[in-house]
Amino acid sequence: MPPLPHPEQRQRILFYLPMVTNWWFVHIVEPMLRRLAERHEIHVLAPAPWRGTGIGPEELARCADLPDLRWYIMDGPDHPSTRTTPEDAEGLIGFVRDLGPDLVLCRTADHETVRHFPGIVRLLMEGRYEPFAPPPRWILLTERPHDHGLLAEMPPVAADRLRTMLAPAWERLQHSLAPAPEERATLFARLGIPEDRPLLLLPLECETEDNFLAMHRLATKPNAALVRELAAQLGDRCTLAVTNHPLNDAHVDAAPLIEAVGDCDNVVLLPPRIGMHPATLAMARHADGMLVGDSKTFALAAFFGVPMHRHSRFDSGGWLNAYAALEPFVADVIAGTARRPDPESARLWFAQYLLNDGVDPLAPEDDLLARLARPFDPERWEAALARLERTLPTLFAEEAQASG
């Protein structure tokens, strides 16, 4: 492993951005460029626009006041391949090696190619997990795209401190999201869900054309086909409650999904929202199990203690007690013996995520290079808690805790 950067030294930093969308550039990448360019040498390597990703005139114009940025725009006929597996991976790797960055920050689905880049290489991944749901601009710095629920190695005193720091907000949110005793029966009756068999919740993943991370899914079939397949496997043993991804609702033709649900008598397609909450959150409180792949919705199963089957090529934290195979999971759910996420570890993971791991590109106290030098650092937890008190005051502010 290359040596970690010293936060005070001038670094050569490469942003490698084949999967960056305009939203990601405006809200996440540009603020990072501006902050890092004040002290470091910044290079940006990205393909020309294609399928909603890449760097084009609009993104370049936004940074026209940063003349010291070095831009490298790949516009050859093979540039679309950089989103998944580059046609000329060796040439790309050689270019980056010649550039010699100390640090490479990547927005890409192709984590295998970037492993061969020099310097410290990290992926920029979405960092907004429900039910705490910090601002959408939050990110995580990771080495693989969808290793979920992993806990850092830490001494017991650090783990105790993290749990204690999160405890007021955790308890407040657990209390506010606890459903009323009669809510399940009322909700099931309204949605036409039978109560005489277990309910499995399936949050569908994003199918928009700019989501090249879908290349990693073990279930590569379209969502509509996945629903049909699971419905056939479950038969009359369980009801499958399906929630669509919000970006699918906004940008993807829902007709095939609606047709698939209509053809299956054991499937219910939930509306985008149920009462005050997104449907996945609202139904997770009542589900007997959840079926997840690479989706961040695993965090809802963790928070509510819902047994889960995770179908993914990536790692899951052992405390999630996720099932890798569907049939043992379904059998245990039916028997009422399914393994659940460990509640104390769940609180520890959320605390680690909120106070140690999550990056806000706009937070002035968030020193990116310091994070890379010290990925686990109790010295930044107080500042992170103060940041959360500003951004999520109903959960974290002292006056909210006192009034609770």
Image (cartoon, rainbow, N blue to C red):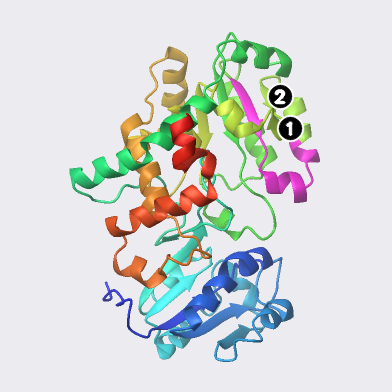
Left or right, 102 with respect to 15, comes to: left
Q: Which residues are magenta?
A: 239-257
User: Could you say which is closer to the camera, residue 393 or residue 273?
Assistant: 393
x, y percent for residue 119: 35, 78
**Among the 4 quarters of the image, the one containing residue 9:** bottom left
| Residue bearing mark 1 | 260
Find residue 264 and name its label.
2
**Among the 4 quarters of the image, the one containing residue 80:** bottom right
Left or right, 404 with respect to 317, comes to: right
Residue at x 52%, y 44% (from the top left corner): 393
Residues under numbered marks 1 and 2 in contact, where contact means CB atoms less than 8 Å apart: yes
x, y percent for residue 136: 59, 54
Q: Amino acid at mark 1?
A: Ala
x, y percent for residue 320: 37, 35
Q: Is residue 256 magenta?
A: yes
x, y percent for residue 275: 69, 27
